Image: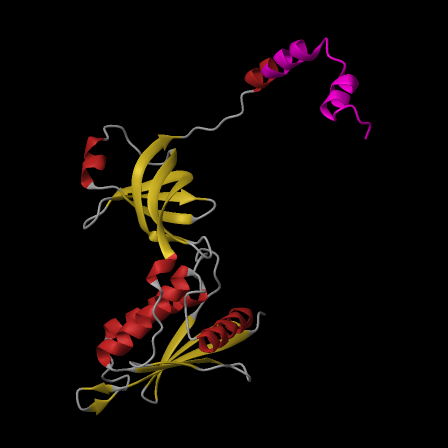
Amino acid sequence: MEKIGEIEIRVVGKSGNQDLSPENYDIKHIASILQNVEDLLFPTNKKDRPIITYDIQEGSVRHFFKTTIQTVIGFSAVLSQVQANESIDFLELKTARAIENIQNLSRQKNYEFQIKTSLNDSYELTINPNTKFIRTENIWVDAEFYFYGILKDAGGKSKANIHLDTDDFGYLSIETGEKFLKEREENLLYKKYGVRAKGKQNIETGEIDTKSLQLIELIDYQPKFDNDYLNSLIKKAKDSWKNVNPDEWLLNLRGGYEA
């Protein structure tokens, strides 16, 4: 059985005139913490992540998350680096954004968040209204990208978008605008496409802000191996080279010098 570790996020503050406790801590703040913790621990591959269990206890408000010890060790290292650098710019985007969300909530509600793990030498990261765990905007620049995958969904209530399931980047939501979807007469779903899109990219790490993606062009993409075409190219190459002495050609290429 895999060893389990624990992560604690303690929230200290007031609800009106009362100290925070599970009795007066609003459910929307619990939901926010749950979402942010998943991004903190697994910013890239959520499909294959291990189970995370949750508990809330007294002592102001204490959120407890249990998961694999390997995950907890990795998260403890992240806490130590954030504390040492007093910056989140070096983190993966979703991890940085999760810490930034906690920082924003701290300022909005005047809460202090104390984050630590169950490891003996664990670092404790404190986020309060006076800390400044906010990303530096100027490291993100406009860029253009190509993605390839299967289009799994199209639509959206507030923003029209397509959902592309890719091997390299996971499940991407790409904003399209309503006009694009209205003009498409054919069924787009469950077909392979190439997508040309624009968005934000970190100039230091190369990381893509997948929440910023906007469609430029949808490209029909049906890759297939054409054996007849390949054989025709090989035949043409043989005909072109049949009167060429490969040893002489290679010697000329080297400028007359033997290897």
Residue 18 % position (x, y): 21, 91
- Magenta includes 251? yes
Colouring convention used in this rendered image of the protein: secondary structure
Question: Which residue occupies 61% across, 12% down?
Answer: 236
In this view of the protein, which residue sits in the foreground, 236 or 231? 236
Instruction: Give left or right: position of 231 versus 176.
Output: right
In this view of the protein, which residue sits in the foreground, 255 or 213? 255
Residue 52 % position (x, y): 44, 69
Residue 95 % position (x, y): 41, 65
**Magenta span main SS:** helix
The quarter of the picture where the C terminus appears is: top right
Q: Of all residues shown, which one is farthest toward the right? A: 258
Q: Quadrant of residue 3?
A: bottom right
Question: Which residue occupies 34% across, 89% down?
Answer: 59
Eyeballing the image, is 89 above or below 219? below
Eyeballing the image, is 138 above or below 14? above
- Magenta includes 15? no
Residue 141 % position (x, y): 36, 52
Range shown magenta: 233-259
Q: Quadrant of residue 194?
A: top left
Eyeballing the image, is 242 above or below 230? above
